């Protein structure tokens, strides 16, 4: 009986090792097909993650955040192995053809890529050794995390009474745009509630940016975003327009450093300030 059980486990384990199928639930990223003869051995798809193993154009470590994918491709039994440079150059050529750039090449084994298209920035890292029996790909579609836990009306009022202002991170815009995204409704509803429950409260709605890009452009963008928030509060949530005044200060009032991606994310915000 023990021998039978041992053989069963042995053959089951062997079948898993030598399986030619992709990992269950996995699929290639739409931008890239895989190298011929390879399968997906490892796969991750996370709605939001911070990837801190990317290098910028100067070879310095940086982190990117957003929708995260990870692929570990392995060579199928009996198939011809690609070389590491062959794998890397295939991905480099593919990103260039799509309109992207090669950000940095690290030695023999890593390449870092970037694509800006349709108001989305996509970051790609590919790792393949000289003999690519397997290779790895990391992809991040840059985006701010959707805030599931929002500051409610009572918390807003508490901060306003204590500090004269409250910083909000649950109001979303597409990259370089001023249109308020639908997922902002949870926070906007709480602002409406705050004002309906406090009839004497009037607010400045102030847009803030990080320090990336032209100063004057950021001032205009932050003003446009503040204007958009006021407009939707009035049109969709029935707030009296006379109780709100919009303003944009661009990068002039950071809450933390702009030297890190995390800091930049905190500096991109909308604030409510008591008049």
Image (tube, rainbow, N blue to C red):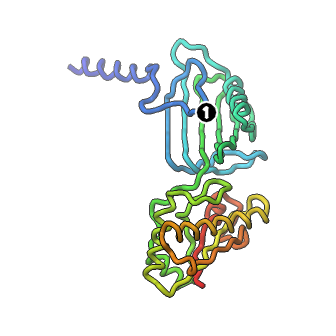
Q: Is residue 4 above or below residue 250?
A: above
Question: Quadrant of the rendered structure where residue 23 is?
Answer: top left
Q: What kind of element bears circle 1?
A: loop
Measuring 52% from the left and 68% from the top, which residue is drawn there? 235
Position of the C terminus by quadrant: bottom right
Q: For this view, does 82 lie left or right of residue 102?
A: left
Q: Is residue 23 above or below residue 155?
A: above
Measuring 49% from the left and 76% from the top, which residue is drawn there? 156
Measured as percent of width and height from the top left, residue 21 is found at 45, 22
- Mark 1, residue position: 31
In this view, the residue in front, 16 or 49, is 49
Measured as percent of width and height from the top left, residue 190 is found at 46, 71
Q: Is residue 65 above or below residue 236?
A: above
Q: Residue furthest top?
A: 78
Position of the N terminus by quadrant: top left
Q: For this view, does 86 lie left or right of residue 234?
A: right
Q: Is residue 236 above or below residue 261?
A: below
Q: Residues within 10 Å of mark 1 (few under 14, many from 20)?
A: few
């Amino acid at each position: 009986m023990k021998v039978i059980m041992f053989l069963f486990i042995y053959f089951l384990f062997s079948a898993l090792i030598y399986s030619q199928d992709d990992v269950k639930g996995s699929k290639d990223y739409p931008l890239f097909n895989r190298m011929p003869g390879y399968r997906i051995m490892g796969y991750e798809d996370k709605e939001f993650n911070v990837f801190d193993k990317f290098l910028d154009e100067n070879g310095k470590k940086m982190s990117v955040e957003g929708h995260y994918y990870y692929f570990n491709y392995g060579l199928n039994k009996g198939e011809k192995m690609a070389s590491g440079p062959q794998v890397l150059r295939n991905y480099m050529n593919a990103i260039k053809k799509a309109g992207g750039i090669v950000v940095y090449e690290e030695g023999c084994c890593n390449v870092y890529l970037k694509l800006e298209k349709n108001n989305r920035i996509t970051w790609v890292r590919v790792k393949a050794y000289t003999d690519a029996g397997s290779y790895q790909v990391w992809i991040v579609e840059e985006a701010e995390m959707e805030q599931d836990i929002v500051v409610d009306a009572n918390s807003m009022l508490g901060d306003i009474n204590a500090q004269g202002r409250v910083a909000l991170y649950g109001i979303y815009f597409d990259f370089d745009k001023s249109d308020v995204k639908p997922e902002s409704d949870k926070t906007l509803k709480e602002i409406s509630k705050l004002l309906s429950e406090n009839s004497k409260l009037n607010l400045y709605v102030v847009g803030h940016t990080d320090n990336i890009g032209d100063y004057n452009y950021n001032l205009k963008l932050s003003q446009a975003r503040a204007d958009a928030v006021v407009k939707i509060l009035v049109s969709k949530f029935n707030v009296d327009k006379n109780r709100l005044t919009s303003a944009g200060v661009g990068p002039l009032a950071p809450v933390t450093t702009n030297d890190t991606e995390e800091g930049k994310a905190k500096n991109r915000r909308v604030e409510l300030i008591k008049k």
